[in-house]
Amino acid sequence: MKKIKNIAIMAVMAIAAISPVASQAQFRFGAKVGLNVNSLHLNESTFDASNRAGFNAGLMAEFTVPVIGVGADISAMYVRRSAEIKGQPIDKREYIEIPLNLKWKINVPVVASIVKPFLTTGPSFSFLTSKESFREFKNKKTDVAWNFGFGVELIKHIQVSASYGIGMTKAFESVGLTNGAQNIDAKNRYWTVTAAYLF
């Protein structure tokens, strides 16, 4: 809980740092869809976790300060992530995810109105909405990660981006194991590729 609180404080401080220029910002919103590839970082090296594909969809809003290209975006996304250990799928987790990113759009002379690259970073808060799939594993209700991403904006409306999320809290842990089995817990690691259209 303390870790979540610290992340929330950092996010608020980051927004406060750019708030003096927020009055000049351009606000936009739109729809966003994409794919994610999830892997689990286990506390037990004797188990192997494999990559599993999922998807996401939702809404996005951003504000950007003209000329310098600094701003932020926030999304509300439905996300499905799958997990697999030792070749066996253990569950399909569904979340409402709220990523909050600082964003820097890089103005390239001549082509900026057509193609504009950007970099993003920030926390992501995921809230579990699905039920337990397997009785041996208990999913955590809240999952916090930190994302690092990059992308391009095309013709001022379409944004295609990729990001890597590093889980900072446990995504699930084993419960009720018998026969001397060791407890397992895991954090998410995932790539996300999205496309958004902003009005």
Image: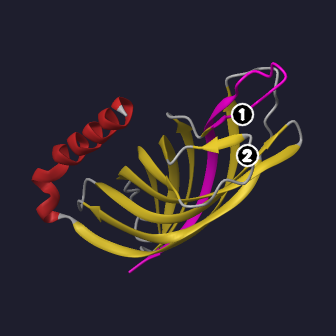
Magenta stretch: includes residue 135:
no
Are there few (<14), some (14-19), or many (20+) residues within 10 Å of tag 2? few
What residue would you read off at disc 1? 176
Residue 165 is at least partly visible in this image? yes
Are there few (<14), some (14-19), or many (20+) residues within 10 Å of tag 1? few
Residue sitting at x 36%, y 59%: 73
Position of 17 with respect to 59 (left or right) is left
Residue sitting at x 49%, y 42%: 148
Examine the rendered structure and indicate whether residue 109 appears above or below residue 47. Answer: below
Determine the CA span between mark 2 and mark 1.
Answer: 8 Å
Looking at the picture, which amino acid does disc 2 mark? Arg
Q: Quadrant of residue 88?
A: top right
Examine the rendered structure and indicate whether residue 27 appears above or below residue 132. Answer: below
Specify which label sits upstream in the sequence, 2 or 1.
2
2 and 1 marks in contact (CB < 8 Å) = yes
User: Which residue is farthest right?
Assistant: 87
What residue would you read off at disc 2? 135
Residue 97 location in percent, x, y? 48, 57
Residue 76 location in percent, x, y? 43, 65
Residue 120 is at least partly visible in this image? no
Q: Quadrant of the N terminus?
A: top left
Magenta stretch: includes residue 184:
yes
**Front-most of residues 178 and 160:** 178
Q: Secondary structure at mark 2?
A: loop
Q: Secondary structure at mark 1?
A: loop
In the image, which residues are magenta?
A: 173-199
Q: Which coloring applies here?
A: secondary structure
**Front-most of residues 196 and 111:** 196
